[in-house]
Image (cartoon, grey):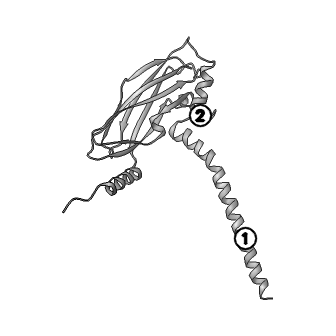
Amino acid sequence: MSGSPANARRGAGWLKLAGVAVAAFAFTFSLVPLYRIACEKVFGIRLEGGTGQARAGGVAAGKVRRDRTVTVQFDGGVNSKLPWSFEPVQLSMKVVPGELNEAMYVARNDGQRAIVGSAVPSVAPARASGHFTKTECFCFTAQTLQPGETREMPVRFIVDPDLPGDVATITLSYTFFKNEAMTAQLGAAMASSTPPAAP
C-alpha cells in the first residue's frame, strides 16, 4: 500500500504538468491577437490584410484614385532622455490614394556615445489611421547611431483609396525614445571589446 500514495502524487504531478503545458499554449496562442490590438490601438499600425508589401501589391494591382489628392503632413520629435535631433526632410506632400509614396526623416546623435533609439508612430486624425499603411519604416526596428552620426530614414506608405471623403489631411508623427535596454547592451559590448590600456 506504500506505493499507492506515491503513484497518486506522481499522477497529480503529471496532471499539473499537463495543465501548465495547456496554459502556456493558450497564453502563446493569445499573444497574436493581443499584439494586433496593441499595434492598432496604441501605435496606430494596421495589421490586417497581411504585410505592408502584400497590401501594397494589392493596391498597386487596382484601386488608385487619381481623381483625389490627400495632404500628408510630417512631424518628428525626440523624448527628453534622448540626445538626438530628429525631423522630417519635408513638412508635407500631396499624395494620390492608392499610390506608393516615400518620405524622408533625418536623425542625428548629438550625444557623446552610441545610443539605440526606437520610434513610435502616430497617425491623426485617429479615423484615418486604419487607412494609412506603412510598407517600409525605420520604426519597424531599433536604430543605432554613433556619436555625431547623421542618418536619413525613409518611410514608404500608401493612403488607402477608401479613406473617408471628408479627410483631406493626415498627419504622420514619430517620437523617438531611448531604448535603455539595447543601449546598455551596446555599451557593455563596446566596453568588453575595448583593449585594456597599457600600463
Q: Is residue 190 above or below residue 16?
A: above
Compared across the picture, whether 15 is left or right of 178 comes to right
Badge 1 marks a residue whose secondary structure is helix
Residue 170: percent from left, percent from top: 48, 25
Residue 31 position (above or below residue 84): below
| Residue that appears at 46% across and 37% down | 139
Pick whichever of labels 2 and 1 is earlier in the sequence.
Answer: 1
Q: Nearer the viewer, residue 108 or 66?
A: 108
Quarter in which the C terminus is drawn = bottom left
Q: Foreground: 192 or 98?
A: 192
> How far separated are the C-alphas under marks 2 and 1?
41 Å
Work out which residue is located at the far top of the displayed protein and give it.
67
Labels 2 & 1 near each other (Cβ < 8 A): no
Report which quarter residue 56 is drawn in: top right
Q: Quadrant of the N terminus?
A: bottom right
Which residue reaches farthest bottom? 1
The reply, left or right, for residue 50 in relation to residue 93 is: right
Residue 92 on image: x %, y %? 41, 22
Horizontal and vertical percent for residue 195? 28, 56
Can you say whether 16 is above or below 46 in the image? below
Q: Residues within 10 Å of mark 2 (few under 14, many from 20)?
A: some
- What residue occupies the far right of the structure in this picture? 1
Q: Where does label 1 land, which residue?
A: 14
Residue bearing the label numbered 2: 51
Q: Identity of the amino acid at label 2? A: Thr
What residue is shown at x 73% (from left), y 76% (from top)? 10
Give the percent coordinates (x, y) of residue 76: 38, 33
Residue type for callout 1: Trp
Q: Is residue 160 left or right of residue 152?
A: right
For this orientation, the residue located farthest to the left is 199
Q: Quadrant of residue 41?
A: top right
**Label 2 SS:** loop
